[in-house]
Image (tube, rainbow, N blue to C red):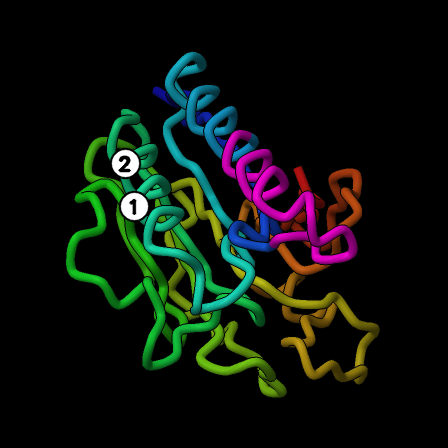
Amino acid sequence: EMTMNKIKLLHCADLHLGSDGSLIPERAGERKVELLGTFRKITNLCAEEAVDVLLIAGDLFEGSNVGVETVASVKAYLGEIPTWVFIAPGNHDYVGLDSPYLDKDWPDNVKIFKGGLERVDLPDKAAVVYGAGFESTYVKRSLLDFPEDVDGTKINLCVVHGEVVSEGGESNYHGITPGILAGSQMDYVALGHIHKRTELQTIGGTTYAYSGCP
């Protein structure tokens, strides 16, 4: 008997928390609070909608020198929700030596991808999340070396920061080619980096999209 495998997910990216929008210096503090408020709306939505998985596709923070209060708020908001959270660091919030992503006190429901492609099986769902993270500002080689034995009986999700390029194209910000997407065997790839939302695109059996800035 076939049972429909379902999962409810929320995909966001490019929040750039801690950015002061420094074009207007006197509004810097206000802007930081607004950005954090937007993130709070996202986590509230996860709770209200009983979202299973929150995929954050990079540039959650503007940089590694983001204020401790901002980081503490993000950890608190994420720790309060009944949702599995997956963060794929991007070119602004890459995992460097002083990255908040290396802190030991992230909530238990949060998984941060700190380098090459990793796989996480969701304990209570027939779903798997793959992800990778930037370790420096520029990533010129693909982080997406998907295994050949992806389990097609499960829902396969991927979260990553990068730039979709044409076949044979390159990018300093993790170029992702149509061939990589088509051959990935993923059901959905949640992308970050491009600040404009795209419609859902499908190539091969894989659907992908940029969420854009919230």
Looking at the image, is 151 positioned above or below residue 80? below
Front position in the image: 4 or 51: 51
In the displayed structure, does residue 106 sit left or right of residue 182?
left
Q: Position of residue 137 (x, y in %)?
A: 57, 80
In the displayed structure, does residue 112 sit left or right of residue 11?
left
In the displayed structure, does residue 136 sit left or right of residue 141?
left
Q: Position of residue 61 (x, y in %)?
A: 50, 57
The magenta span reads: 20-37
Quarter of the image holding residue 79? Answer: top left
Q: Which residue is mark 1?
A: 72
Q: Residue at x 59, y 34 (%)?
A: 34
Q: Residue at x 30, y 26 (%)?
A: 81
Q: Are marks 2 and 1 in contact (CB under 8 Å)?
A: yes
Q: Residue at x 53, y 60 (%)?
A: 160
Residue 73: say if magenta: no
Residue 35: say if magenta: yes
Looking at the image, is 134 positioned above or below residue 138? above
For the residues labelled 2 and 1, the Cα–Cα distance comes to 6 Å
**Quadrant where the N terminus is found in the figure:** top left
Q: Position of residue 85 (x, y in %)?
A: 35, 42
- The disc labelled 2 sits on which kind of residue? Ala
How many marks do you count on the picture? 2
- The disc labelled 1 sits on which kind of residue? Ala
Looking at the image, is 185 positioned above or below residue 13? below
Q: Residue at x 79, y 72 (%)?
A: 165
Q: Which residue is mark 2?
A: 76
